[in-house]
Each structure stands twice: as C-alpha cells, then as structure tokens.
Amino acid sequence: MKSSVLIVDDDKTIREELANYLSDDYITYTASNGHEAIRNINENSDIEIVLSDLKMPEMDGLELLKKVQDNNKDIVTIFMTGYSTIESAVEAMRRGAYDYLTKPLDLDKLEITIKNAIENKKLRAENIMLKQRIREKYDPVTLVGDSNKINDIMELIRRVSSTKATVLILGESGTGKELVANVIHYNSLVADGPFIKVNCSALAEGVLESELFGHEKGAFTGALYMKKGRFELADGGTLFLDEIGDLPPSIQVKLLRFLQESEFERVGGTKTIKVDVRIISATNKDLERLVEEEKFRDDLFYRLKVVTIEVPPLRERPEDIPLIVDYHLKKFIEIHHKQIKEIAPDAMKIINSYNWPGNIRELMNCIESAVVMTLGDRITADSLPPFLTLKRKKVSGKAPENLFEIEKTAILDALNKCGGNKAEAARVLGIGLRTLYRKLEQYGVEE
C-alpha cells in the first residue's frame, strides 16, 4: 500500500508540480495554506508525511507543526525553505520536524528524505511495539501451573493461536483471562502487529463508542479533531475486549457488524473503514444468562464464541498454588530488593488452606505484602496479610465473635505490623486511607 504525502505551499505551481512528481510512488494531497492542511489531515487519516513550505501567510510552518503534533502524533513533517529562513527551519527541527530542504528543491534529495522519514516512522512504531511486548512479559497477572486444567488450556491456546478465529475467554475475576489473550496474540500469525486492549466496563457508553470506532472532527462537543479508534489502531493485529458482558446494546450492534463485514464508520462520519483485526474478548459474566434476559444479543454471542476458553478458578487447581507462590516470590524479592530465601512451612500451610476468592490476583497481592512485611530472610505466618492470620485464628477456635470484631482485629493487626504507619497499613489492607481513618474513629482508637 502506498504511503500518503500532504504537500502544503501557497504557490500553486510548486504544489501541482510536486504532487505530479510524487504521484507514481505516493498518494498525494495538496493544501494552499496551514488551515487547509489541517482540514486535509482531519479528513484523510492515511496521511503520513506533511511536506510544507515554512513561510506562509496566516499560519506559518511552525504554527502548522504545533497543530500537527498536538492532534496527530504519528505524522512526520518535512519543511521546504529559502536560504533566508534556514534559522527558522533549524528551530522547526528543534521542535520536532523531521528535516528541512532548501529551495530550489533537489528532487533526488527530496525522494531520499521522504523514504527515510517513512522508514524512521516505521522504526519508531516497531520500537513502541517492542516496549509493549517487554511490558507484557512482566505482566503482574501470570498464568503459572502444571495442573491438568492448565495444561488443557495451553493445548487449546496452541491450537487456536495459529488461526484468526474469534476467541471468547470466560472465568472469574483475577483468574488470568488477560494473560490468556496475551499468549494467544504473541503466538499468532500477527504477533508483530499491534495488541490493543479495551476495558468495556471502564468507560461510559458515548466515550466507549468513540474509543472503539474513533470520531470525526465536530462529531460532538469537544471533538476538535479527528481521532482514530482502537479498531483502526489494531489494524494488522489483535483487539482484546475485556468485560465484554458490559458492552452497551448500541455498541453491540456495531461490533456485530464489524465481525460480519470487518468494517465500520467513525462516530459522526460517513466514510466506511475496513481493517484486518482479530477479536479476542473476555468476561466474568454468564453471557448465556444475559442472552436469555435479552441484555446481550444472541447473534453477537455466537459470533464471539467461535472458540471458547474457560479459565478455572484457583480453588479448582490447588496443586498449582506452590508454583504460583514460587514464581511471584522470586519476582517481588527482586522488585523490593529483599534477601528472603524461603517461606516457612507453617506459612505455606496457611496459604494452601485458603480458598482464594480473588484468585491469582489476590494470591499475588498476598505474596507481595508478605515480602514487604518480612524483616528477615524467611516469610513466616506473622508476615502474612491479616485476613490469612484471622483465618488461622478462626480454625484454632479463637476467632472474633462478629464481623465488627473481625474487621477491627484485622485493621489493628495491620497497623501493629506497619509500626503505626496508616498509609502503609491501608495499602496492605487494600482500603483507602480515608476509610482507615473512619474505621479507627468508629472503633474509638485515638492517635
């Protein structure tokens, strides 16, 4: 596919000659001034290079550069300038322009500069993608284990990764659904393509529609420029839709159309956009029940579940707990610069006996808390978070008699272990600092 170049110059002859010269190798657009250039950019999302005169009436090149950078971070700007304005061209490069060429233009040098600019743009995109892949490698939720259920999931992942099939991942919160999506993408045919994630429950309906499909300039109040949506950004890769069960009905319709036709329109737009994107979705909700209650479209449900992967909760694979503990223990020892060598058998026994309703995420937070609270080289039962300690007391017949006492004991125990540091205690307990102060006031605990 050809790259697109926008040529901006108030001299009509220069515009047309350059457009004609570049038209064999590039899609060309032209603009007579900065304002027209911005309109072109907003209307044509494929523009990659802006080749602009530096000295223009109304809006000069430096102002145009700023507007391009504010609204379209991916566009590369090259300036054309006379000898009298070379100083301004150097200033433009300092502000982020790729290069400048002096008039009269050397056409061979122009071609080389444009090719280098496009290559530089691709390298930057690959660098961003590489950094993202490194971040994914150290994702805080990691699927670890050797149980039959985990081995079955890994086998299913191996089968589906090499295809473009739509995948629906089911499981309780904290089981590692996002990691499954990561593994599928990074072992797929589009592993080098973008991996874009959206949490469907985190955004209001209007905002979510714009985030997914993008919007045109003026589509709504505050839409000051065209914006690409996640579908466009994921072109050539994978789009992961987390919490798909919370998708509003109006967006369910647009998603269904995309799954059928691989096309959509931006909010406020009429131009149909086609992209090549694989869809992976996940939810902790019962979609079949939502379909029965007419809260989720049945035709969309069937489109999403071409392949279904169910991630089991931790309580159904307790044999994996020691492996998960060992994995996260090593990770947090390194992060927090601790010299811990092991977990004491009594502490490990408490960890193994807990039900882990929060699954991997809860276990991971527990291990981090224990690493932080341990002073020596061994994690003991006293280093574990208060909720696990309370469970041990309950088993031994020493549990507080009511919920109020359980809560009070947990908070005071955390404060004691944190040396009275309320901010640290709140973090260990997983509650806000204001909540901690309010609870202490209820208990009548003074400073």
Image (cartoon, rainbow, N blue to C red):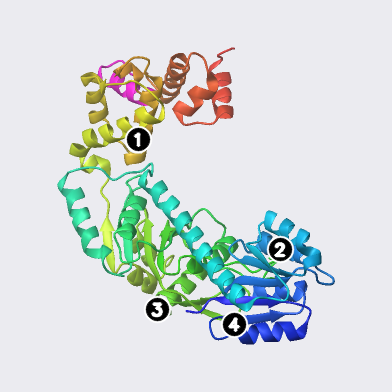
- CA neighbours of label 3 inside 10 A, class few (<14), some (14 to 19), many (20+): few
Q: Which mark is residue 260?
A: 3
Q: CA distance from mark 1 to mark 2?
A: 46 Å
Distance from the alpha carbon under mark 1 to that under mark 3 = 39 Å
Q: Find out whether residue 396 is within the magenta segment.
A: yes
Residue 78 left/right relative to 301: right
Residue at x 33%, y 34% (from the top left corner): 363
| Amino acid type for the residue under numbered disc 4 | Leu
Residue 397, image x, y percentages: 27, 17
For marks 2 and 4, the one nearer the N-term is 4
Secondary structure, mark 2, is: helix
Identify the residue under disc 1.
Answer: 364
What residue did someone put label 2 on? 65
Answer with mark 4 or mark 3, whichever residue precedes in sequence: 4
Specify the amino acid type for callout 3: Gln
Q: Are marks 1 and 4 in contact (CB under 8 Å)?
A: no
Q: Earlier in the sequence, mark 3 or mark 2?
A: 2
| Quadrant in which the C terminus is drawn | top right
Q: Which residues are magenta?
A: 386-399
Q: Secondary structure at mark 4?
A: helix
Q: Quadrant of residue 330?
A: top left
Residue 134 in the image: above or below residue 413 = below
Other-residue count near label 2 (Cα within 10 Å), few / some / many at <14 / 14–19 / ≥20:
many
Vertically, is 382 above or below 403? above
Q: Which residue is mark 4?
A: 22
- Where's residue 425, x and y in %? 48, 22
Q: CA distance from mark 1 to mark 4?
A: 56 Å
**Label 1 crowd (10 A; few <14 / some 14-19 / many >=20):** many
Relative to the observer, which residue lies in front, 319 or 26? 26
